[in-house]
Amino acid sequence: MRHRLFTLEEANELVPWLEATFQRLVPTQEELTALQSRLLVLQRQRRSNGASSSQSEVTQVQEEQDRLVQRFEESIREITNQGILVRDVARGLVDFPSIREGREVYLCWIGGEEQIEFWHETDLGFAHRQPL
């Protein structure tokens, strides 16, 4: 399947939307991490003495975790459905497939940058970003 290729202008038009989307995603990811830790504690307590955490509490935490996972995945899908490659949610790191000098490259953006100013080869990552 052929994927979308972005011009620099098209990618830059999506930066404010990406910034807002990641600002919503990061707290969800943090909440999810906290719930996963809580669930592990509850499950360990149940195994060790069987009485310290009730099944209803475990079920409640699992249901909340499932809801957050669904919300998180929907937000990621909103981004990837645009043709954008999500690399790191916590940092807001994404790549936009593009053409530069006749070959496919990635325009690279990370949360906090006002516009896209870097690119890298498709087989290299963030550490190899080069200025446009």
Image: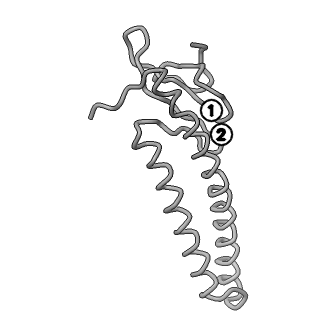
Residue on which the image places disc 2: 91
**Position of 60 compared to 10: left or right?**
right
**Position of 50 compared to 103: left or right?**
right
The kind of secondary structure element at disc 2 is loop
Residue 63 tag number: none
- Residue 103: % across, % down: 38, 14
> Neighbour class for label 2 at 10 Å: few (<14), some, many (≥20)?
few
CB contact under 8 Å: marks 2 and 1: yes
* Res 43 → quadrant: bottom right
* Res 59 → quadrant: bottom right
The kind of secondary structure element at disc 1 is loop
The residue at 64%/72% (across/down) is 39
Quarter of the figure that contains the C terminus: top right
Q: Nearer the viewer, residue 118 or 113?
A: 113
Q: Residue furthest bottom?
A: 51
* Res 52 → quadrant: bottom right
